[in-house]
Image (cartoon, rainbow, N blue to C red):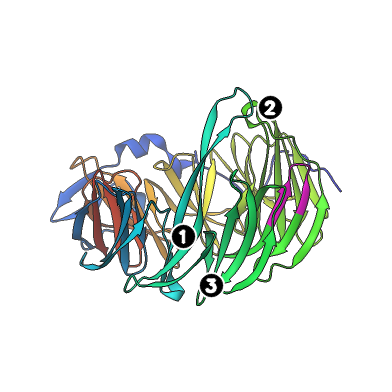
Amino acid sequence: MSTIELGEMQQGQDSLSQPGFDRRLARRIALVLVVALCLAGLAASAVPRQRAVQSLWTMSIETAQGTTLSRDGVFVHRTADGLTTVTAHELATGAVRWQRRFGGTVGYLQAAESSGLLLVPAQGHLVKLPSANDGSAFHAEFHQQTIAISAATGAEVWRTAGEPHSVDGGTALLTEYTPEADLARMRLVRLSDHGTIWSRDTARVGNWTVLPSGERPSKIVTATDDGEIKVYAYGSGALVSTARIPWVESRPEEGYFNDLGGTGDVLVVNRSRAEVFEMSVYRTDTMAELWRASDTNGYAFPCGSALCLNDGSGLVAYDTTTGARRWRIDGAADAWQVSADRLVVGEGSESGRHVLVDAVTGRTLGASVEGTLAWNGPQDESVVVLRPTESPPNRTAVVRWDLATGRQWLLGAIDPMGNPPCSALPGHLACFRGDQYEVLAVM
């Protein structure tokens, strides 16, 4: 076991305050309309292109409780008079494919693309639980059943106990809860027939997480309130390793809590004790401690093949196994992995300034961009960035950001987006605008 101090990094350093991130320049950026919209102020990397955004259809979601996107459909659920109606729309046209009704309320619908299914959490329960400090209460909701229906027809395929937590290929991880909303069991099932691949009872588990390898789940980690850790293989449920580690007695209202994260290879445990933070990194196959850091003032999270940490004045990337610093970007606060070797690093605001970064070296690629990323997960070649226009006002510019080079080009302008922001699918954007939901084609 070793302790690594968080000192200054001397190489691989970059900054959000370098010339590419000049805030005064950003305020001068504007859009002008001359034949086709051209993006001004995005430095030399912004390449005007022919307008390539077109509205396809719009619908009202005033009474909707939720929407779910798939590669070719939009699923909307509405609850009224004790019944929930799920309506399936064609993504390209908005035409209604089918409608299906369920008794009571349902949870968030998950599309299982590879199996052609839509997973519907049903039989919801709302539990009132006491707070630990002042006798007040909060509510926890869980669902006792999952109903799988055909995404193409709405016909029921199967139903089983538990609610869907995650979907991966032809499997789904289901969770079951006690009447007090404590986790009771995890179960991996085949989507084809809901047959159980493995099942694990989870008595005494108070904290747990799924760790990814790349874009796929790899390990499941559970923790009890006294720090007993168990690591399971996601696909087989086999116990990989177990250990008892230092653990903070959970008193969230006083700032005492634990947080689990990491990758399929390493488990990151963040411990908070009233504004005092400590982080330990363990191998998931043995639970041997690899390195630790004190006074971290935040949470480490995967960024490419490294772990990133916001140290209060910038973002630092550490080697996962040794804790050695790889690179640092001053002024940055967070990062999103948008491809296998690319990160988008931001200053802490969803609609703020971002820069594209090589995940291995920390080298910036192209000019910075200000706006909101529209995406549903890692992309292959590019992401879409949305930003308010200054001239003409009250519009949203749609900019494509190439992940290989960092080049940007304007696709067009659309009506102002709402909250939550737009989601991107191959060839499409889906945007909320108050009580309206609009689907657009994006070339």
Residue bearing mark 1:
377
Q: Position of residue 264 (x, y in %)?
A: 67, 62
Q: Quadrant of residue 97?
A: bottom left
* Residue occupying the far top of the picture: 134
In the picture, measured across the screen, residue 228 lies left or right of residue 335, that is right
Q: Label 1 amino acid?
A: Gly
Residue under the point 36% across and 56% down? 103
In the picture, measured across the screen, residue 370 lies left or right of residue 9, that is left
Q: Is residue 182 above or below residue 176?
A: above
N-term mark: 3 or 1? 3
The magenta region covers: 221-229
Residue under the point 66% across and 53% down? 262
In the image shown, does 290 or 412 lie closer to the viewer? 290
Residue bearing mark 2:
274
Q: Quadrant of residue 379?
A: bottom left
Q: Secondary structure at mark 2?
A: loop
- Mark 1, other Cα within 10 Å: few <14 / some 14–19 / many ≥20: some
In the image shown, does 190 or 124 lie closer to the viewer? 124
Using the numbered discs, state the Cα–Cα distance from disc 3 to disc 1 in whole angstroms.
26 Å
Q: Label 2 amino acid?
A: Ala
Q: Secondary structure at mark 1?
A: loop
Residue under the point 76% across and 64% down? 239
- Residue 404 visible somewhere in the drawing: no
Residue bearing mark 3:
194
Using the numbered discs, state the Cα–Cα distance from disc 2 to disc 3 in whole angstroms.
44 Å
Q: Position of residue 240 (x, y in %)?
A: 77, 64
Q: Residue 291 in magenta? A: no
Q: Position of residue 339 (x, y in %)?
A: 51, 63
- Mark 3, other Cα within 10 Å: few <14 / some 14–19 / many ≥20: some
